[in-house]
Amino acid sequence: MKHPLSCPRKRASSNHGTLDDARPCNKRLFVNTGSSAFADDDSRVNGSDHLRPPTRRLQRREFIALLGGAATSTAFWPLAARAQQPGKLPTIGFLGTTTPSVWGPWTAAFVQRLRELGWIEGRTVAIEVRWAEGRSERYTEIAAEFVRLKVDVIVTAGTALVAAKQATSVIPIVFAVAPDPVGSGVVASLARPGGNVTGLSLQRTDTAGKRLEILREVLPALRRLAILANVGFPQSVLEMGEVQAMAHTLGFEVAKLEIRRSQDIAPAFAALKGGPDALYVCSDALVNTNRIRINTLALTARLPTMHSVREYVEAGGLMSYGPSYPDLFRRAGDYVDKILRGAKPADLPVEQPTKFDLVINLITAKALGLTVPRSLLGRADEVIE
């Protein structure tokens, strides 16, 4: 059987241009926001009724193309051919925590929403894009650079949010994803954020129990659960604690795989003992950047994986359940629009996810010798086969 991760490293087709290098970019980018192979699936139903049809089935060829695109170091942020005179347009500073290829579907959704609202790169807005490549020390450097450039608004997510807030109390900051913005102190409250920061809260730990329930549907004999988390990221530590508590309630034994850097991942798997039945992955920028490596090691160890982010399943994981990241980044475009038109972040309440996805990878299930119940497939938003 062909290994589900041994696909050609080819780019997914797209009518965007590409960046030639995934290193941190120091140029102003001009966006051609045509349709993308990675655009969010607008046919899905919005709302809080998460687990329901219709199901979008992703064929093997499409899956391989997506996986190859995720593995490559080139970017999905599109370019236009024209140059622009600096200083004449409002400027967005976009701080990506990982790499362009990892954030491809999310940035495409963000740029498309801006275009729909009339913000066209090179005509009505400029976008300064920087990539931290999963290196937390880069967050502070990039945020400081945006302050020097006097951008009009900073857009970021996750672990970079604190660095952006520390860099400025004046420039508006929009976060597309933040696990616990109140607990981390970046906003005063969800209803009244105060200060210069607002965006979308990602309360992943609230759905941890649901993920374990779904995992048990596929693995009725589940008894031993491994949990992988970056313990250098406070929100991942909180999620790991909640998953562990829930697992004990369900009678599971728990093994923790604690990492702080990419070099810790392989040794963490090698140290696994007791033969866990499944792996729960707590996502953050470090894990996101290394998601293909993690899925490869899990498959080698015959471990079914549960994730919170759809793109991890496109990268070879078994299942994911959680908020739609493309939808969150799209909604971040609404915040940017309001701020560029004069609204203050302090007056824009922090919003919650409204769209959740259950994604199942039948290619990985087959490689693991698992049969996914038809009832679960019927509730999935997307099936990769």
Image (spheres, grey):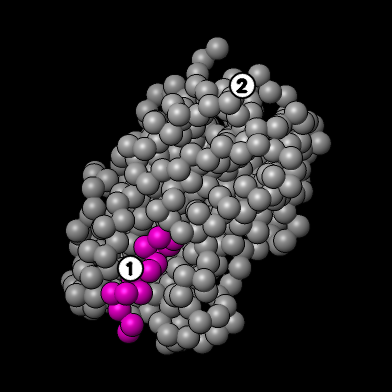
Crowd around label 2: few <14 · some 14–19 · many ≥20 (10 Å): some
Instruction: Decide which of tag 2 and tag 1 comes sooner along the chain.
Output: 1
Instruction: Report the amino acid beneath label 1.
Output: Ala
Based on the picture, tell me whether residue 366 belongs to the magenta stretch. Answer: no
Residue in the image at 52% along x and 47% along y: 282
Q: Residue furthest right?
A: 375
Where residue 235 appears, as percent x and y from the top left, is 50, 59
Q: According to the image, label 1 marks what residue? A: 163
Q: Which residues are magenta?
A: 155-170
Res 302 → quadrant: top right
Q: According to the image, label 2 marks what residue? A: 368
Residue in the image at 68% along x and 23% along y: 370
Residue 101 in view, yes or no = no
Viewer-proximal residue among 58 and 31: 58
Viewer-proximal residue among 280 and 66: 280
Residue in the image at 44% along x and 50% along y: 231
Residue 350 in view, yes or no = yes
Q: Quadrant of the N terminus?
A: top right
Q: Quadrant of the C terminus?
A: top right
Q: Mark 1 falls on what kind of element?
A: helix
Where residue 211 appears, as percent x and y from the top left, is 67, 46
**For residue 283, side relative to residue 143 (left or right):** right
Based on the picture, tell me whether residue 158 belongs to the magenta stretch. Answer: yes
Instruction: Report the amino acid beneath label 2.
Output: Leu
